[in-house]
Image: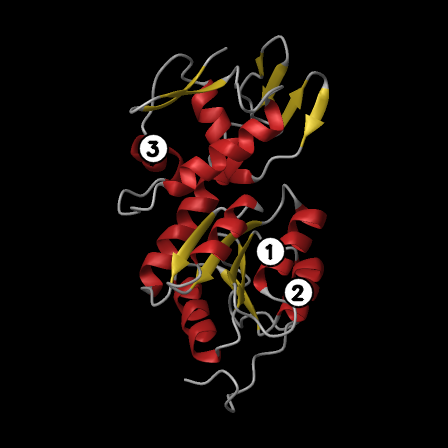
């Protein structure tokens, strides 16, 4: 379908889904300029117990995220006006540790997909996709946040402190801003010091679904973590590569 063709209008951004107030699983903003995709995704999420809103372009998405502060944004990269990558940048600038993001991308958008991951996207789904699979991804991303142990003791090293309860990280006394997924990768590795994990094992443990096959996202998150917590990311002290096997955390 040509995106320039006439389409049915979106529900107003301010409208909540009727009858969804009692659902406690969280709220999701669905951003896509193709109404059929947005509405189908929203319906599947609603059936799974989420409150949803939809936006048809980047400007609406930014306004909706600012006004409703969703738990997660399902974000199409190809949007009219302000594109998905710019929306990602603005979401991270204003809600760096608050809003999770799952990108919707086309098969030919690998470069933009990698940029999105580097900007802090928690996951991505390639079009065409199964709505049920997307719901599973939303569940997995938000479950990691919901099940974080609020009373867990901080992990304290000479130059690095990880506070699981507050979801905060300090490097040499200065707080560093990590995305949800970056924090989860770091916390998982730090809780298993010296143990080597392959990218597939990290994907299963942190992303929590085994059918996800593109493990390059693990490499991207490791690279971003090193740039934020290591004195010399090219010679990492804490997150070390075990060539041909995977990664380990060295206290």
Q: Secondary structure under badge 1?
A: loop
Q: Residue at x 64, y 12 (%)?
A: 159
Q: Residue at x 51, y 33 (%)?
A: 223
Distance (Cα) linking label 3 and label 1: 30 Å
* Residue that mark 1 sits on: 70
Q: Measured along the vertical axis of the image, is residue 199 above or below residue 78?
A: above
Q: Position of residue 54 (x, y in %)?
A: 55, 70
Q: Position of residue 215 (x, y in %)?
A: 35, 41
- Closer to the observer: label 3 or label 2? 3
Residue sitting at the far left: 211
Q: Secondary structure under badge 3?
A: helix
Q: Quadrant location of residue 48?
A: bottom left
Q: Measured along the vertical axis of the image, is residue 69 above or below residue 180?
A: below
Q: Residue at x 46, y 31 (%)?
A: 185
Closer to the camera, 124 or 184?
124
Q: How many marks?
A: 3
First along the sequence among labels 3 and 1: 1
Q: How is the image coloured?
A: secondary structure
Q: Are marks 3 and 2 in contact (CB under 8 Å)?
A: no
Numbered mark located on residue 64 in the image: 2
Q: Quadrant location of residue 84?
A: bottom right
Numbered mark located on residue 199 in the image: 3
Q: Residue at x 26, y 47 (%)?
A: 211
């Amino acid at each position: 379908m040509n995106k320039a063709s006439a389409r049915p209008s979106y529900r107003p951004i301010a409208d909540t889904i009727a009858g969804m107030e009692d659902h406690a699983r969280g709220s999701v903003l669905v951003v896509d300029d193709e109404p059929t995709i947005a509405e189908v995704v929203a319906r599947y999420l609603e059936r799974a117990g989420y409150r949803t809103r939809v936006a048809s372009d980047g400007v609406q998405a930014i306004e909706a995220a600012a006004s409703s502060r969703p738990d997660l944004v399902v974000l199409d990269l190809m949007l009219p006006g302000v594109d998905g990558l710019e929306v990602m940048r603005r979401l991270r600038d204003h809600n760096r540790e608050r809003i999770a993001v799952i990108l919707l991308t086309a098969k030919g958008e690998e470069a933009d997909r990698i940029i999105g991951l580097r900007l802090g996207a928690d996951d991505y789904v390639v079009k065409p996709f199964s709505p049920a699979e997307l719901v599973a991804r939303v569940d997995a991303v938000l479950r990691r946040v919901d099940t974080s142990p609020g009373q867990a003791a901080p992990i304290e090293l000479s130059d690095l402190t990880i506070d699981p309860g507050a979801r905060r990280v300090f490097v040499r006394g200065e707080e560093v801003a990590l995305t949800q997924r970056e924090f989860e990768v770091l916390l998982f590795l730090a809780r298993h010091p010296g143990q080597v994990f392959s990218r597939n094992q990290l994907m299963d443990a942190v992303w929590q679904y085994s059918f996800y096959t593109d493990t390059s996202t693990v490499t991207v998150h490791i690279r971003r973590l090193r740039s934020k917590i290591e004195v010399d990311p090219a010679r990492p002290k804490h997150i070390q590569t075990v060539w041909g096997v995977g990664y380990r955390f060295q206290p």
